[in-house]
Amino acid sequence: MKFSNTLIPTLRDIPANAEIASHILLLRGGFIRQLGSGLYTWLPLGVRVLQKIERIVREEINKTDAHEVLMPFVQPGELWKESDRWEVMGPDLLRMQDRHENDYCLSPTHEEVITDLFRKNVKSYRQLPCTLYQIATKFRDEIRPRFGVLRSREFIMKDGYSFHIDEKSLHATYLAMHDAYSSILSRLALDFRSVEAHGGVIGDDENREFHVLADTGEDAIAYSKVSSYASNLEKAEAVATGDVATASETLTKVSTPNIRTINGLVECLDVPIERTVKTLIVQGRDSPIGLVLRGDHELHEIKAARLPNVLSPLTFTKESEVRHHVGCNVGSIGPVQLQIPYYVDRSVAVLSDFVCGANEDDFHLTGVNWNRDESLQSAAIQDLRKVVEGDPAPDGSGPLSIQRGIEVGHIFKLGTKYSHTMNATVLDERGESVNVLMGCYGLGVTRLAAAVIEQKHDEIGPLWPLEIAPAQVHLVALNVPRSSEVVNAANHVYEQLTTQGIEVLYDDRNERPGVKFADADLIGIPYRITIGERGLKENTVEYQHQRELKVDVSLDQVVPTLLQDLG
Ligand code: ATP
Ligand code: MG
C-alpha cells in the first residue's frame, strides 16, 4: 500500500470532543472519521485492523464447530413482538415502517431472527448441537454514544447462537466459547478477565462477560489476585466484613442536634465510621422498607431492587412519607424498634457496639447490639452493598482487587427463553416435541479495536500488536524528490517485501521527513524501515521496532532481517 494513493488523513492536533486514548488516536492516525452521533466511517488503515481482528475471531470460533451465516440488518417487528422484546428494548431499538406500513427495526442483536431460522429448518434432535454465528453490523440507539467506537450506535459484532437438546450439550458449547474468547483475547495480546455478570435484557441465566482491563473502562471489576474469581461490580457478592466482637457497651441514647449525615455523626460522637449504621428507606410493595448498612458502605441499588417486596426500579421514599411512617427525619432512623420491615446488610449483622439513629429527631443510640437491643430474627440479613477494595472474596481466596474494565464480549446460557416464547421445538429421542436450549455469544469487533489501543499506546501513538497492525512494516523514503537513489532503493525494498507477502505501508510521498516521522508515530505500525541519502552513502538503512530498537542495517540485509524477526 502506497501512502500517496490511499487515504490516511492524520491529525496533528487532539480533536475536540475526544477524551480517551483510543478515540483520540484512531482519529489522529487516520483510522476512522465520524459521520454523525455514534456513526463512524472506517478508513483503509482502520478496515485492515478490523479485518485482522475478524480473521482471528473466525479462526478461533470455527474451531468450536460453529458455522458462519449472514443475517439481515433490518428485521421484521413481528418477530420482536412474538418474543415480547418490542416493548422491553425501549428506545434502544430503532424502529421504522416500510411503504406497506409494516413495522421493522434495525438489528441490535439477532436472537429473534436466528430462533425463527431454526424453528423453520431444524426438526430433529439428531441435527443438534448446532452453532451458527455471523460478523455483522448492529445498531443500538444508545442514550449516550461516547468514546468513539467504544460506545457507538452502529458497530460490528460477532454474534453466535447455539441450539441443544440438553443442558450437558449447552454447557459443553458454553465452555468451548469461553475458551475461544480467551484464545482470541490472548492472540490480541490483551490483559483481560472473564467475569460473572448480570444478563440484562437478553436473559438471566448463567453468563460471563469478558473485560479488557483499562482505567477508561465503564465497568468496575472485582477479582481475586490468587483465584479465578472475578465479577462485574454490578453483580459482585459482598460478604460480611469486620470483627464479630461481643457486646461490651451499654445502650445509650445521646443527643445529636442537627446531625443528619454519617460524616456529621462520626465527627459529633468521635466514633469510627465502621461502627456507624445508616438506614435508607425505599418503596416496598405494602409499606416503605428499611435498608440497614454500615456508614462507610454504599448501597448496591441493583441488589436492593431484587429483594422480595422491594419495588423495582428502586425508589427512595420521600422525606414527608418517611416521617409519617417512622416518626423522624431520614438522618435519624435506626433499626432499633423500627416500625417498618427492614433488611440488614451482612456486614451490619456481625457488628457489635454500633451507633445508629434513635428514630427520633436529633437523637442517636450508641452501644447498640443485635439480640440484646434488637432481634436479628425479625430482620432478614441480605447482601445489600457494593464490594470495596480489600473485601474478602466470596470464594474465600483472599482480598478482592477492583479495577476498571471494558466489556468486549458476553456469553450467555439462554435456556428456553426464546425457544419457549417463539415456539422453537425439535423431536427428541422418544419422538416428543421439546423446546430447544439455546446459548448466545457476542463479541464486539469494533470495540475490540479501540480496547487494544486503550491498553497498547504511549504518549506518541498506538503500539499495535503485530497480528492486528494495519501493516507489518512502515517503509519511509526520505527526501523523495531530491534523491533518485533513495527512490530506487525504497522501490526495490518495497517490491522485495511485497513479493515475500509482507504487508507494507510505503510512504512514497513528497513530504518533509518530519511530517513522515510524525505520521509513522501516529499510525503505530510495529516495524519501520527508513531510507535516506545519508545512510545510503554507507549502504545502510534505519531499522526500527516500535520504540525499543533502532539500528542501522545494510541495505541488502534489511529484508532478511525483517523476515527473521517476523518469524
Ligand atoms: P454494554 O453493557 O457495554 O452496553 P451490552 O451488555 O449491551 O454492552 P451485549 O448485548 O452483551 O452488550 O453485546 C455484546 C458485545 O457487543 C459487547 O460485549 C460489546 O463488545 C459490543 N457492544 C455492545 N454495545 C456496543 C456499542 N454501543 N458500541 C460498540 N460495541 C458494543
Ligand atoms: Mg453485556
Image (cartoon, rainbow, N blue to C red):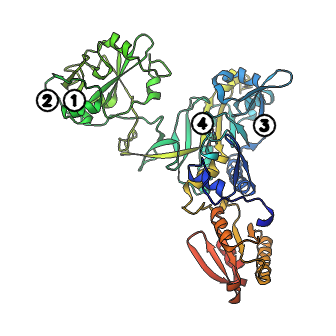
**Between tags 1 and 4, which lies in front?**
4
- Name the one closer to the observer, 418 or 291: 291
Task: Give the residue drawn at x 80%, y 82%.
Answer: 484
- Left or right of 281, for residue 67: right
Q: Are marks 2 and 1 in contact (CB under 8 Å)?
A: yes
Q: Are marks 1 and 3 in contact (CB under 8 Å)?
A: no
Disc 4 marks which amino acid? Arg
Q: Give the CA separation, mark 1 to mark 3.
A: 60 Å
Q: Which residue is mark 4?
A: 144
Task: Give the residue drawn at x 36%, y 45%.
Answer: 399
Q: In this picture, is 500 found above or below 171?
A: below
Disc 2 marks which amino acid? Ser
Q: Which residue is mark 3?
A: 71
CA neighbours of label 2 inside 10 A, class few (<14), some (14 to 19), many (20+): few
- Name the one closer to the observer, 151 or 175: 151
Disc 3 marks which amino acid? Met
Inspect this view and state whether residue 103 appears.
yes
- Left or right of 233, for residue 87: right
Q: Secondary structure at mark 2?
A: loop
Q: Earlier in the sequence, mark 1 or mark 4?
A: 4
Q: Secondary structure at mark 3?
A: loop
CA neighbours of label 3 inside 10 A, class few (<14), some (14 to 19), many (20+): some
Q: Which residue is mark 1?
A: 352
